[in-house]
Image (spheres, rainbow, N blue to C red):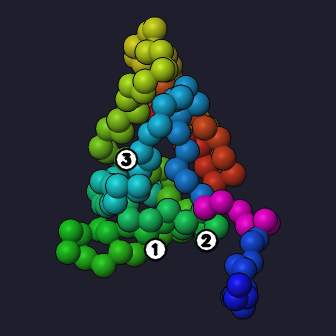
Amino acid sequence: MTEVDTPLPTLSLDAEMAWRWPTPPFVHRQVTTPLDTGEQPCSIETPEGATVESQLVGFDVDAGQMRVRMHPDGEPVALRFSKIRRVTLTTPWPIARHVLGVPDERSPHVMHERGYCIELASGVELTGRTLAHVKLPCGMFLF
């Protein structure tokens, strides 16, 4: 029997998992999250209230910025979270897929819909309708 002198790979047990876009708390099925499937059309609102339509290319929580493409043929640019009031993904996100062995929802998602009102530090109030929210250190995600 010959001995192989190949070192074993080093395991890092302290490595953090990469950040993933959050899913609604009521989702118990396997879902594809935004950016898993490539660029996502979005509307970006500045702190002053102006909006810009663009393509969300990347979302880097650790760097506190996102990358967007302002024009279809343009290069992606980085925008700091501090320069953004709100980002709205403009393509509906499919969240319900039947999985064998998992019971279907008893009530449609629209029955979970609620109004929200968020007061920003600037005093501006954001209002709308949502099915759920997830609050993270990088921001509030409404679904």
The answer to whether mark 2 and mark 1 are in CB contact below 8 A is yes
Q: Which range of residues does the magenta coloring cover?
A: 13-18
Q: Is residue 16 magenta?
A: yes
Q: Earlier in the sequence, mark 1 or mark 3?
A: 1
Q: Position of residue 36 (x, y in %)?
A: 41, 55
Please report the residue visible at 34 percent of the width from the left and 60 percent of the height from the top: 38
Relative horizontal placement of residue 91, taking residue 2 as reference (left or right): left
Q: Secondary structure at mark 3?
A: strand
Q: Residues within 10 Å of mark 3 (few under 14, many from 20)?
A: some
Q: Quadrant of residue 55?
A: bottom left
Gap in angstroms between the C-alphas marked 1 and 3: 17 Å
| Residue topped by disc 2 | 63
Looking at the image, is 83 positioned above or below residue 107? below
Q: Quadrant of the N terminus?
A: bottom right
Dot 2 amino acid type: Ala
| Residue topped by disc 1 | 78
Dot 3 amino acid type: Leu
Seen from the viewer's position, the closer of residues 42 and 44 is 42
Please report the residue visible at 47 percent of the width from the left and 37 percent of the height from the top: 30
Q: Position of residue 130 (x, y in %)?
A: 47, 27
| Residue topped by disc 3 | 89
